[in-house]
């Protein structure tokens, strides 16, 4: 029966991140999401960029956000052109790293029957502040490359 097994938790209850091991997968959609992302990246590599406009309104005012250039970056990663992908958006490397972690979690869970979970307190200064700084720096970097990724 779900939820009746032993739960192993590490870390202080108020820590910025806590790790748990439970007896069932509470997040099976993540593996489907990663699979869909891989299929989407493969389609971008084979078929090229979509014929529809994926930009937000600020893009047309010349304001680049942290995700600007991500579609092209994903396409270039799928094509194996890593330097070009990084030029369009260096944050593209978060996607394969996260995909590898989700796949490793799924393999570990299937092999052991124990599913690893991470709980993150995003409002914690130890997590939220560094994430905010990285997002601001990425936004500034993307704005500096407006000639490459701009309208």
Image (spheres, rainbow, N blue to C red):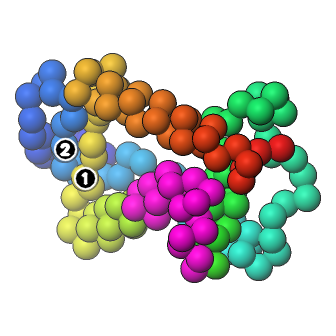
Q: Is residue 39 visible?
A: no
Could you say where residue 141 lies in the image, as x and y percent from the top left? 54, 42
Could you say where residue 122 lies in the image, as x and y percent from the top left? 34, 26
Relative to 55, say whether 38 is above or below.
Answer: below
Q: Look at the image and tell me in which quarter the C terminus lies.
A: top right
Marks 2 and 1, the one that precedes in the sequence: 2
**Residue tagged 2:** 20
Q: Is residue 12 left or right of residue 109?
A: left
Could you say where residue 104 lies in the image, as x and y percent from the top left? 32, 67
**Residue tagged 1:** 116
Residue shown at the point (46%, 64%) measured from the top left: 96
For label 1, count other residues whose C-alpha is less than 10 Å away and answer few (under 14), some (14-19) or many (20+): many
Q: Magenta stretch containing residue 22, yes or no?
A: no
Which residue is more in the foreground, 108 or 71?
Answer: 71
Residue shown at the point (71%, 75%) measured from the top left: 45
Which residue is more in the foreground, 150 or 117?
Answer: 150
Q: Magenta stretch containing residue 84, yes or no?
A: yes
Q: CA distance from mark 2 to mark 1?
A: 6 Å
Identify the image quadrant of residue 131. top left
Q: Is residue 24 left or right of residue 97?
A: left
Relative to 142, say whether 60 is above or below.
Answer: above
């Amino acid at each position: 029966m779900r939820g009746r097994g032993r739960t192993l938790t590490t870390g202080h209850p108020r820590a910025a991140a806590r790790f748990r091991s439970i007896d069932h997968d509470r997040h099976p959609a993540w593996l489907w999401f990663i699979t869909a992302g891989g299929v989407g990246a493969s389609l971008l590599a084979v078929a090229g960029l979509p014929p529809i406009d994926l930009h937000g309104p600020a893009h047309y005012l010349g304001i680049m956000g942290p995700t600007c250039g991500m579609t092209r970056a994903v396409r270039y990663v799928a094509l194996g052109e890593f330097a070009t992908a990084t030029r369009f958006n260096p944050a593209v490397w978060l996607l394969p790293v996260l995909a590898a972690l989700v796949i490793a979690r799924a393999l570990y869970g299937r092999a052991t029957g124990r599913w690893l979970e991470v709980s993150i307190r995003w409002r914690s200064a130890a997590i939220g502040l560094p994430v905010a700084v990285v997002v601001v720096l990425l936004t500034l970097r993307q704005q500096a490359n407006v000639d490459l990724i701009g309208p």
